[in-house]
Image (spheres, rainbow, N blue to C red):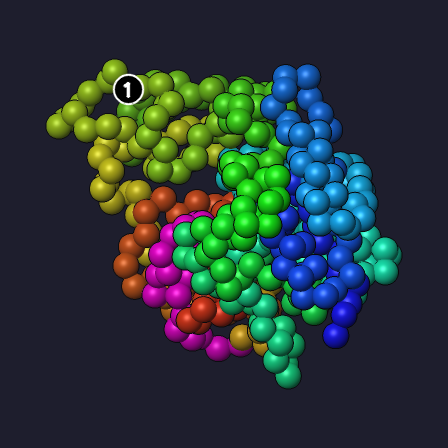
Amino acid sequence: MSRRIIVALSGGVDSAVTALLLRRAGHDVQGLFMHNWEEDDQGYCSAAEDFQDARRVAAELGISLHRVDLSHEYRERVFAHFLSEYRAGRTPNPDVLCNREIKFGDCLRHALRLGGERLATGHYAQLRETAEGPELHKGVDPGKDQSYFLHDVPRARFAQALLPLGGLRKEQVRELAREAGLPVHDKRDSTGICFIGERPFREFLARYVSPTPGPIVTPEGAQIGEHTGLAFYTLGQRGGIGIGGRREGDGEAWYVAAKDLARNALVVVQGAQHPLLFSHGAEVIACNWLCATPTAPFEATVRLRYRQEDQPARIEPLDATRLHLRTAEPQRAVTPGQSAVVYQGTRCLGGGVIDRTDI
């Protein structure tokens, strides 16, 4: 059945092939370009170039292209949270929040106002319709699967979404684009956080977060240096700590093991396998469930960061929005602020934000 489908056309190859496939399937396809970030004066934002690429794709496919400015909403609901978390010494994942608040929030609502029945995106994940509602599953390409970034989208919104690339591998997508003559078939994939672009992360963060220097200490309390501010470091980090020339014991490299917020101290250890870099459990908050809200402990697998292999774990719900998880094997650099996402097989059950870790 032909439907009007609005494709979130970003200017990249994935969304271009999404539009191509839906057009070939006979749908009334229109493109929607989201403008999420104001241009800066240093040439790092690629929004203008991406919009021109989206226009070229739309022209090649013979579809209309709309443009919506969501930069205010993005700053208010994604970027403000991003800064707040870093100031609190945590390491947030803005792509997760962007999918919930912007792509499958404001963008979805705008697509519906344009008369679309569904919003389609170029995410590498799969949606399966069931009697109980839509299920989110991993994409078949393990190197590109993006279900991790979609776990926080309210389940009901997936009923108005399409993810046509979930059953394809990246090389297949590029080949489809090349065969169809799409002008972005060889465009390089974007990397990193969209509003930071290719610039150094610490340089960008320093524009918004003031330095708060403090001591760099060992677990025993000995001060061995000074940090520029806890916001500028993440757990498990090796480079850029500022004590590279200092050698103690067996001379192994230093790693960030913890942030002591009360003392504004950065705790570091030597050796990539130091016990303080590992934890068996975590408390997870702000959970969003893509299944019936669990009330009893169960066995599943989890990912505690993107691209991590699934880790067997026991999930213990604490209430509707909090859980405690304990992994079968100790996990390295489990980081407050990052997402813990729960799976059973290929199905993503949901997840939340890591609040604290335990040994």
Q: Nearer the viewer, residue 354 or 103?
A: 103
Q: Is residue 299 magenta?
A: yes
Residue annotated with mark 1? 244
Residue 255 among magenta residues: no
Q: What span is in magenta?
A: 295-312
The residue shown at (29%, 43%) is 276
**105 displayed left or right of 196:** right
Q: Examine the image and state in which quarter residue 112 appears.
A: bottom right
Instruction: Name the residue: 24% across, 38% down.
Output: 272
What amino acid is found at the position of numbered circle 1 in the picture? Gly
Mark 1 secondary-structure assignment: loop
Q: Image quadrant of residue 325?
A: bottom left
Q: Judge from the rendering whether residue 249 lies leftward or rightward of residue 340; answer left or right.
A: left
x, y (%) of residue 244?
Answer: 28, 19
Residue appearing at x 43%, y 45% in the figure: 335
- Residue, far left: 250
User: Can you give x and y, in whole percent of width and height, for residue 246 in the image?
Assistant: 24, 18
Residue 92 to residue 161: above or below: above
Give residue 341's position: percent from left, percent from top.
48, 59
- The image shows residue 235 at horizontal and vertical percentages of 39, 38
Residue at position x 70%, y 69% in the image: 159
Q: Is residue 99 among the parts visible in the rendering?
A: yes
